[in-house]
Image: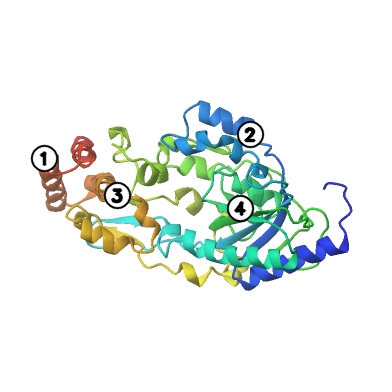
């Protein structure tokens, strides 16, 4: 709490914005004060330790990341929204040819488009309510610490896996923000009567660490040991390796990443807060995130052309992976099934990998992945 008494007009403005955000389909909405991050030192230490990997844009824009006020002159407020993109139900085991799973956030239309279009409408609403106000859309399109902003806006708390957890609803959320110079009552300035699920919206903050306690399930379950309490080493994270990393994947990871082809959800799958509850079933997920594709045939991927990739990635977050990356990822995901596959199937996988490793027509990162696969068993 700031001790600042919210005026009725500022509170009414916040409530109007929250109502409009819910009308636009956002599951959660709140307002934080525009201020410097309390985690600046942690971020700079994380970068200094090289845990951001090849994501140079984070290091290059760290000043923006630690203070949203650098994005907009005289910024006062940050309107934070969240889409719930999955209800926490486990995936069904696939049968037949080995398949590679896609992280749940990437199974539907590109979330950037789904969130940005509605953020624009919400920003326009703010400018209509506050003539002359300036707004700046942000979120995953800029390197701000958006989970910290969401926690400040009382959307939930950051868990040990570094994701935002909403009590009773879990962590399957995608976030977006609007930085504005409009003077809006922050969510922690005064409680509101409306109840969102089992968690009073705007009524109280969730202290850091209170949701996780002594639980270490996400840390223990991470296949590559990328997670330490409230920190993730991107260079070991399956999501980073299969999406952000553009080069060869170290051979030491082959056989350890399971059937993940694009991204990973393991830390969320094992989190107690992400298990289906009465509140989560009642809330559901945004139908815009209904999956179009949840997995791919890994052996088919190895024979894809650029045209095959182009058909797959239309309006999809999958477009972040190039064709060589997709083939590299397929070989990574085949390393696990190879150890348990029937003899004939395992031999077919090894034979195909050997062909790729010897092919001058394949990308170097694909040939290296094929060699790593062959060396993993």
Secondary structure, mark 3, is loop
Q: Position of residue 152 (x, y in %)?
A: 70, 49
Report x, y in % for residue 299: 19, 55
Residue 360: assigned label: 1
What residue is disc 3 on? 322
Closer to the chain start, of discs 1 and 3, is 3
Q: Give me the C-alpha separation between circle 4 and circle 3.
A: 31 Å
Name the side, left or right, on which 131 lies relative to 292: right
Q: Residue furthest front?
A: 132
In the picture, the quarter occupied by the C terminus is top left
Q: Residue at x 17, y 52 (%)?
A: 342
Residue 254 shows in this picture: yes
Q: Nearer the viewer, mark 4 or mark 1?
A: 1
Cα separation, mark 2 vs mark 3, equals 33 Å
Q: To which quarter of the image does residue 40 belong?
A: top right
Disc 2 to disc 4: CB gap under 8 Å: no
> Where is residue 11 drawn, in percent x and y?
82, 62
Task: Give the CA distance from mark 2 to mark 4.
Answer: 21 Å
The answer to the question of whether label 1 and label 2 lie on touching residues, with beta carbons closer than 8 A, is no
Question: How far separated are the C-alphas under marks 1 and 2?
Answer: 46 Å
């Amino acid at each position: 709490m700031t001790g600042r008494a919210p005026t009725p007009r500022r509170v009414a403005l916040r409530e109007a914005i929250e109502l409009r955000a819910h009308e636009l389909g956002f599951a959660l909405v709140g307002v934080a004060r525009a201020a410097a991050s309390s985690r600046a030192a942690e971020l700079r230490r994380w970068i200094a330790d090289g845990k951001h990997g090849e994501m140079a844009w984070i290091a290059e824009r760290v000043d923006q990341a630690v203070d949203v006020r650098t994005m907009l002159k005289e910024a006062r407020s940050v309107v934070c929204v969240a889409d719930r993109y999955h209800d926490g139900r486990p995936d069904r085991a696939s049968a037949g040819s080995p398949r590679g799973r896609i992280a749940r956030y990437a199974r539907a239309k590109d979330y950037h488009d789904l969130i940005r279009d509605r953020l624009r409408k919400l920003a326009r609403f703010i400018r209509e309510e506050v003539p002359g106000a300036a707004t700046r859309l942000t979120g995953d399109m800029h390197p701000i610490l958006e989970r910290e902003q969401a926690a400040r806006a009382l959307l939930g708390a950051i868990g040990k896996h570094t994701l935002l957890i909403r009590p009773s609803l879990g962590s399957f959320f995608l976030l977006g923000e609007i930085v504005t110079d409009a003077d809006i009552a922050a969510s922690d300035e005064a409680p509101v009567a409306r109840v969102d699920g089992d968690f009073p919206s705007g009524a109280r903050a969730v202290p850091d660490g209170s949701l996780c306690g002594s639980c270490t399930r996400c840390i223990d379950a991470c296949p590559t040991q990328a997670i330490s309490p409230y920190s993730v080493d991107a260079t070991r994270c399956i999501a980073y390796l299969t999406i952000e990393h553009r080069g060869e994947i170290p051979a030491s990871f082959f056989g350890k990443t399971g059937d993940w082809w694009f991204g990973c959800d393991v830390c969320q799958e094992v989190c107690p807060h992400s298990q289906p509850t009465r509140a989560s079933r009642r809330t559901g997920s945004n139908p815009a995130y209904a999956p179009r594709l949840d997995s791919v045939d890994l052996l088919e991927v190895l024979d894809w052309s650029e045209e095959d990739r182009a058909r797959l990635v239309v309006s999809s977050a999958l477009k972040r992976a190039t064709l060589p990356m997709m083939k590299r990822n397929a070989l990574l995901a085949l390393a696990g099934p190879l150890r348990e596959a029937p003899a004939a199937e395992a031999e077919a996988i090894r034979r195909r990998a050997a062909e790729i490793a010897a092919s001058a027509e394949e990308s170097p990162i694909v040939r290296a992945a094929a060699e790593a696969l062959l060396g993993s068993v």
